[in-house]
Amino acid sequence: MAGRTQGPARSRSASGNPTKRGAAAAGEPDGVAKRTSSRPRPAVAANGTAAGRSAEKPAGRSKSPVRAAAAASDSDDAILVKYYREMTLIREFELKAGEMYTRAKIGGYCHLNLGEEPTVVGLMAALRPTDYLFTNYREHGYALSRGMDTGRVMAELFGRVDGVSGGRGGSMHLFDAEKRFLGGYGIVGGQIPPATGAALALTYRGTAGPDAEAVMCQMGDGTTNIGAFHESLNIAAIWKLPIVYVIINNGLGMATTVDHAAGEPELYKRGCSYRIEGKRVDGDDPVLVRDAAAEMLRRAREERKPGLLEVMSHRLRGHSVVDPARYRSREETERLRSLDPLPAFRAKLVAQGVMTDHDAVRIESESIHEVDRAVEFADGSPEPSPEELFRFTYASSVANTSTLMPGDPILPIGWDQEGSR
Amino acid sequence: MSAPTKKAETRPADGAAPVITYRQALHDALRAEMRRDESVILLGEEIGIFEGSYKITAGLLDEFGPERVRDTPIAEEGFVGAAIGAAMLGMRPVVEIMTINFSLLAIDQIVNHAAKIYGMFGGQTSVPMVIRTPGGGGQQLAATHSQNLEVWYAHVPGLKVLAPSTPADAKAMLIAAIRDDDPVLLLENLSLYNTKGPVPAAEHVAEIGKAQITVPGTDLTVVGYSRSAAIARDVAHRFADKGVSIEVVDLASLRPLDRETICASVKKTGKAVILEDDWLTYGIGAEIAATIAEGAFDYLDAPVRRVAAAEVPLPYAKSLERIALPDADALIRVINEQLDATRFAR
């Protein structure tokens, strides 16, 4: 069992409860179980083509937790412009992802955050670097707003080695241990029990307080009908776990409306059964979203009270890239277009004098440029080598793990000859 | 069902190794690992105050407290998934699922999440967790509480599935499972909990992925795991009294599968019978038979035979339950058929 080095510091104490540990275990900056020996670390930082975004990112991320909270004010123009910048980047990234899908650069399923940009940016603004994030499969925007490298996110969509999951996850399964983005998950509701367990792990690491770590678990409206949601909320309530569940209510689970699917269509009220406080917020305003999420996270940190936040948002297009959304009437499509939060936020900032039209155009062209560079980076990144096929099946290597390829004999030729065993 | 006899459980001398039950061996492994490593926590239904449905966790709540011995609500998907998330952050949860039948409520978390997270995210986080769960019929628990579903999990890359048949193996494999960085399902068996055997007091960590020759022989190979391996040992000893040398291969690990040890044994004996607790069609035995057919084809003197459960939702009535389950008598009958078919002189 060599390589079993991760995990909290051990004690040989034979009695009582585990010693409470500090926020992050020593030697484990991201606090994620892993084997350092087999972890892919594509040399993105050393690769100039993908360095752009990480350089401008720290402005919003490196603040102390206290300052981040204090900065949550509408009057802070720089922050609003930063939100617009992030929203624009997500918009341009998603439009490009759709284009790359139609050009067969991206395979599988591809779900876009178009229309949800202010929701995504507001939620990520509330989250600290020390917090953990679990999401569903509609998560490109979260990855970008969390500070993951744009080029590496695109490379994952392209299935390349420099992708954030080494090309093994694809669009639905982005992951970055260092950013504590513990996964996009493709199974509806699948992320909720592990997210709840991550919050459980935090209770062994440290005590409640303003500097405590917390977990955010994002999901769609349709997910609130699945058993894992209810089992997990119940567990979070009885064990007093530091977690905020966030429902992105865009009104549709694929084509099924919330009213058709949910006995309590005001989804934030579904926490009532577990005495979990629920709140609904307008997802078109990143500041409202941020403040609502930050308050729930505060309660999770300081009081160990789980929260349920419902963010009312819009899905401007179909469920996935290949869905033309024919179930929507022309009027509904027109109405959604008029509700597009991005031009609205832009107009608001310009009207308030927070930025000029010129600023907005510059931000937009910078975002387009960054996404173009991301595509260039992804396209230049190699596909995973066939020799790597079995590399990540198991973290601990043991005897007789199968590495048979289709059609291989089950035992190598000559397995029973003298000296082969 | 025929419970393994005491003789079958008494393995060759381990010096002064104390003889304890399979239940006690599991308990001792949990306690030793919890003392050694504070990141080991237990989760499950009724494992604390009630001390476990089968009392494996008796006394652990008192010793380690309610944070490390955590009674869960009846929510298999929820608490198995929670163990996954805790493992991703460096804990080493050991989950008890009351019986393998209930694991179906958690199968999405086990198959779609525990087994996938390490590989799907490019090796960035491992999932060092253990699921302990007993299978087995024969207790008149009827159709939904008597199943042997291990092949469902043994089918899935990313999982490891262990099936100890002796108290010593139960302890050594549970310790190995806890220290392994991958999700491990440790298959226990209701009818093995009270069986006894010598268990060395000193720490022993099993090597995952290796089958064992528990009874060496030259005339016929019997392959088994968990309860069926215990029965196979018993039957082998009975045949030894009649001058027939049966070799018993205890799979011990269902995934990974040690094909070489199986084929090497059949190469020596030329005859193979598989005893398995699950259903015949698509069962563990089907994989073993295919392995032998390919790996030891030239050495076979007779077709490989399987002794498995009758394919029926197991009835409650004792008369029906008894005949539906594979037992020592069925194994003896098939071994004799194999010996007759090859004109084996007795």
Image: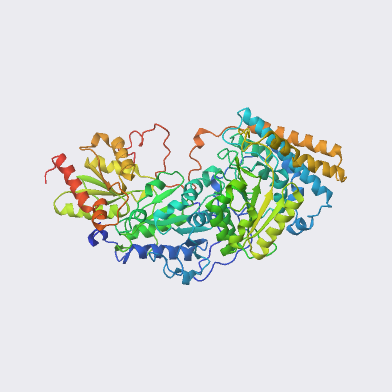
**Picture layout, residue A107 above or below residue B231:** above
Name, please, the residue furthest toward the top: A103
Q: Is residue A172 left or right of residue B30?
A: right
Nearer-the-camera pick, B272 or B48: B48
Asked if A63 appears above or below A337 in the picture, the reply is: below
Location of residue B340 by image quarter: top left
Image location (x, y in percent) of residue B197: 29, 62
* Coordinates of residue A31 in the picture (x, y in percent): 60, 55
| A11, B327: nearer the viewer | B327
> Can you give x and y, in whole percent of width and height, for residue A51 in the image?
71, 39
Would you say residue A49 is visible in this rendering?
Answer: no
Q: Position of residue A196 (x, y in %)?
A: 57, 56
Picture colour scheme: rainbow
Q: Quadrant of residue B11?
A: bottom left
Query: In screen coordinates, is B285 left or right of A331?
Result: left
Looking at the image, residue A274 lies above or below residue A376 = below
The image quarter containing residue B102 is: bottom left
Q: Residue at x 68, y 62 (%)?
A: A299
Q: Nearer the viewer, residue A153 or B15?
A: A153
